[in-house]
Amino acid sequence: MDDTLRELYQDVILDHSKHPRHFGKLVDATNTAQGHNPLCGDRVTMYLKVDASGRIADIAFEGKGCAISQASASLMTDMLVGRTVAEAEKLMGGFLHLVKGEDAGDLDPDDRERLDVMAGVSAFPMRVKCATLAWHTMKSALESGETAKTE
Amino acid sequence: MTAQSKISTAFDPVATRADFPILSKSIYGKPLVYFDNGASAQKPRQVLDAMRDFSATEYSNVHRGVHYLSGKATDRYEASRRTVQKFLGAAHEDEIVFTKGGTEAINLVAYSYLAPRIQPGDEIVLSVMEHHSNIVPWHFLRERNGAVLKWVDIREDGSLDIEAVDAAITAKTKLVAITHISNVLGTVTPLAEIVARAHAKGVPVLADGAQGAVHELVDVQALDVDFYTLTAHKLYGPTGIGALYGKRKHLKGMRPFNGGGEMIREVTRDVVTYADPPARFEAGTPPIIESVGLAAAIDYLNGLDRAAVRAHEHDLLTYAREGVRQFNWLRVIGDAPGKASILSFETEGMHAHDLATVLDREGVAVRAGHHCAQPLMERFGVASTTRASFGLYNTRAEVDVMLEALAKARKILV
Ligand SMILES: Cc1ncc(COP(=O)(O)O)c(C=O)c1O
């Protein structure tokens, strides 16, 4: 069996894609954003609840897509719940480098290990967009919150 | 002139493969199995050589100079036009307009022919299986001119009901815009009949021949179609060039498309008058080298027994269609009788992109996605499909490789 493929579609990824965590809607979301990959038609909607102290109290996502995009969304929501917006942004920045095969910076070793399951995507440049869709959508959800707050 | 390919009575796909240099390439150590011909076909040596030789010995701009090479290049460019004319069975060479592709050819008709004839509420009839390039130009007319798009549904098997087309054509219809072959389903539409029904109501028909020109033997006069478009890169020719066939009577009455050099009769500070078709629609330096490549591609096809090529492609389709029946998790979308060699399918529990990635690692190039046909995806309630589209150089052995790769993908992904 092709090792690069095995690395891409490893069990953790397939498990996340088949049983996505935090899948659904948040009725009391403070921030939402929609992401769309026009190349493949995949869509994702992110719902977050950011509390008064700037902590992501809850996340949910809905969407349809390939195993990579679904697993990436699931893993991300799992990792971001409970973090402050600043922590989330750091993690997101690290991830976006990692999937392109670039230096992910000084991530916490535990975070690094969890994100590493997605690192196989870097060997598939045509699929990097699938992995980043949820993360970019999360970024715009957080930014939409910023503007909402400053108003 | 280009060297004529030799005439063969029987068609041997394996021998043909030697003409296509890229087919001997390996991908991740596996032999390339190229099943993305619907998106773009590979080019035979004859096309590549013709373009290189022309560039090396006869190239110059066209219609502009009095010098030797300008004359040579103009001759070749105009000879290419005649090659396309004959290929489509057009009555006159000035009925062939070179464009940069199929998309531009349709946009040209939308802008130069239809837009000035549209009053708010006028209708354009099209099918739900159109490629975006035969949808969006009409949406422009909806947005800008108040045209109404009338969508004709297809049957569950992907075939088109002529009565449904007929019923959609009303006194308000200004054009029927329909594909000759669906790039997703492979459906061949009953074009001659559609034209007959439309003409009975005084309505012209544009056929999107991006796929049709590849798989069918087209005769625009027999079809009596008003406009027919093609794109060279799917026809084993180069990118950057396509053609619009338009009946003389239509082209003569059409306003120019782009403005620039070549398309004028006279320009003064105050007025401009336009050249006759086809020059009127070919502003600027045209794709000269590409026209030579397109003609070489057509010569190449004409050198084969096209009926035998068609039979071979149908054989591949049937073989693949039968082959995928072993997978109870796979649903073929589009089973219209007599369809062309394009096989689209949906797979339970596997997304088209994941599947295409696994196939790719086996050397099998297929297309995954919406294939620029989102209304059709919506019609079948899918976000995307996987599509294998077969060309003249493909073989049953390659289909076997794909079938094995599909089984493997199932093991990896589910
Ligand atoms: C049915 C159909 N129409 C139109 C087009 C557009 O052709 P092009 O992209 O070469 O302009 C394509 C291919 O992309 C097609 O498959």
Image (tube, rainbow, N blue to C red):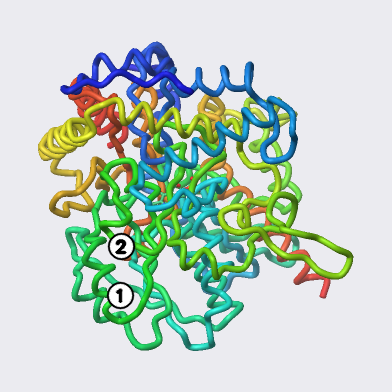
In the image, A144: left or right of B332?
A: right
- Structural crowding at the residue carrying mark 1, measured as other residues with C-alpha within 10 Å and reported as few (<14), some (14–19) or many (≥20): some
Q: Quadrant of the N terminus of chain A?
A: top left
Residue B82, x across and y down, in percent: 45, 41
Q: Who is closer to the viewer here, A35 or B229?
A: B229
| Distance between the alpha carbons at the discs numbered 1 and 2 | 9 Å
Q: Give the residue number, with chain letter if any, for mark 2.
A: B224
Label 1 residue SS: helix
In the image, A4: left or right of B192?
A: right
User: Can you see residue B77?
Assistant: yes
Q: Mark 1 or mark 2: which comes first in sequence?
A: 1
**Mark 1 within 8 Å of ligand 1, using the beta carbon:** no
Q: Amino acid at mark 2?
A: Asp
- Structural crowding at the residue carrying mark 2, measured as other residues with C-alpha within 10 Å and reported as few (<14), some (14–19) or many (≥20): some
Q: Give the residue number, with chain letter if any, for mark 1.
A: B199
Residue A3, x across and y down, in percent: 40, 17
